[in-house]
Amino acid sequence: MNIIPRDIPPRSVWVLEQAGIHPLLARLYAARGVTSTSELDDALAKLLPPSTMLGLPEAATLLADAIAQNKRLCIVADYDCDGATACAVAMRGLKLLGAQHVAYIVPDRIVDGYGLTAPIAQRVKDSGADVLITVDNGIASIDGVAHARALGLQVLVTDHHLPAAELPQADVIVNPNQPGCGFVSKSIAGVGVMFYVLMALRAELRQRGVFNSVRPEPVEGQASTGSARTGEPKLDVLLPLVALGTVADVVKLDANNRRLVAQGLKRVRALAMPSGLASLFVASGRSAPVATTFDFGFALGPRINAAGRLSDMTLGIECLLTDDPARADELAKTLDGINRERRVIEGDMREQAMLIAESLFDEGDEAPPAICVFDPDFHEGVVGIVASRIKDKLHRPAFVFAESKAPGKEHELKGSGRSIPGFHLRDALDLVAKRHPGVLLRFGGHAMAAGCTIHEDGLDTFEKGLIQVAQEWLDAATLTRRLETDGPLAPEYRRVDLVDTLHKEVWGQGFAAPTFSEEVEVLSQRLVGEKHLALKLKHQGQPVDGIWFGHTEPLPAKVTLAFRLDADEWNGVRRVRFLVEGAQL
């Protein structure tokens, strides 16, 4: 591993400090490309205007007309946390804006597969719906959209995934990554796209004078949305859900996404959130008043995702929709139980997958530039997580495959992949598909995560094709693990209050949490729970505790560590602790 300190532009640091930003935060922000305080302004007024997103005016018109005509709306969701939160935002938001008939359908990961398929379209039609709205999917559903339109349904596609050369023939498409869209934040999550649709719809309804007429009183128990009769509904009540889905989908936290997340976090910390989120905080042992992006990404998100991986994402969506605290507690506990089961399955799969991956090369040799792993006993709901674990350990693009359990698809393998910087996974799949026609039955995704379906006879061809692309695209520098850090930590910043200050900020993909690095002395070390290394360190002449989760190999007496700051509490006293991320021996 190479530990590489980030460049810290001194002028940017100076500009930020002059504006009153804490010196440590100024240094961290500058290293992440922030050059002015305007980029740190998280006010809602600073959000990118909906007018710049292609398709939003048409989507608003379609939905406003449907509401005026009392049409039945049906949302087709996805079975991950982004899809679940997008569905909940759509359901809650459309009702706030006057829709009387809104329902949803979420495909089963195993039976239905991903996205809007023809059978799903038929189910929407059979439900009596007039308008089909996709959230976090649909841009690749050429056949599904065509079938829905043939059934007489109006189709609004809202998505954020990268489109193929052919777009579905929907009535309206809202996707910042479609050709011709000038919306700057291409990394917005599916839930963020749906939030923008609702903002555009509210503007359209405002223009039509809808909010000047008498509106029904809100249902008892629902979140307040402003004046019950003449005021516009307040969509900011949806921001906690937008923040959760954005962080859980690991999209790049550009300035616009950071504003959405920051606004959601503010409301969560003020306990202004749906009952389901409050119950998920309790079930996961986290504290909402001091909520962080880590809580979204590593506590709440996995519990929602677990429903889609092992059970039915309806459980996750219902948890996000209910306004009954008792019902929310019950659903959150169920999700927590499913997540515990997921951990057991993942642990067994991870061990087996790692053995298979490491058998692909001799000890002491370099791993191949891309890894493909399959076992007949793998559970397809967990392949993505296991692929991520292999990628993390071997620093290679990794695909993990499992047998499809869908009726009639028994000879298909479903794969999920995770990538490393410098290797665009969806583009790699596209190239494999062109070079080996027919081997990929379906595929889609992003740069760092993608999925595909192949015939069981095509695994060897797929593996060779992916390795060939990796050999062409990746060089020795890219295949060497790099850990970017913020350099040494000045001893005056090794304080609990600064740990709390850092935790309050919005960190995540593309805006990495602060990680420091420097040489320290290892005073003592011992294993904790058989798989974690507890450390007593000397940093800048002062003792400090450290822990390296998931690491068991002993460290030398002097070593350069990369670490994050944390606060550990013992006997009511909080002390700074280093969370070790890596070592350069």
Image: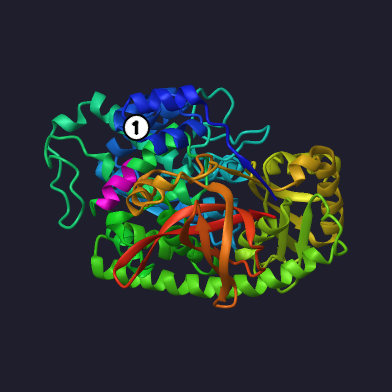
Range shown magenta: 263-269
Q: In front: 544, or 2? A: 544
Question: Residue 565: percent from the left, percent from the top?
Answer: 45, 53
| Residue sitting at the far front | 541
Whether 266 is among the magenta residues is: yes
Q: Residue at the location (72% across, 62% down)?
A: 401
Image quadrant assignment for residue 506 = top left
The residue carrying mark 1 is: 21
Neighbours of disc 1 within 10 Å: few (<14), some (14-19), many (20+): some
Q: Residue at the location (19% across, 35% down)?
A: 232
Question: Residue 228: percent from the left, percent from the top?
Answer: 12, 42
Q: Residue at the location (61% across, 65% down)?
A: 382
Q: Looking at the figure, which quarter contains the C terminus?
A: bottom right
Q: Residue at the location (44% across, 23% down)?
A: 52
Question: Residue 110: percent from the left, percent from the top?
Answer: 60, 64
Q: Is residue 458 left or right of residue 169?
A: right
Q: Is residue 217 left or right of residue 280?
A: left
What secondary structure is found at the residue carrying circle 1?
loop
Q: Is residue 407 left or right of residue 75?
A: right
Q: Is residue 481 left or right of residue 258?
A: right
Relative to 551, residue 83 above or below: above
Relative to 91, residue 402 above or below: below
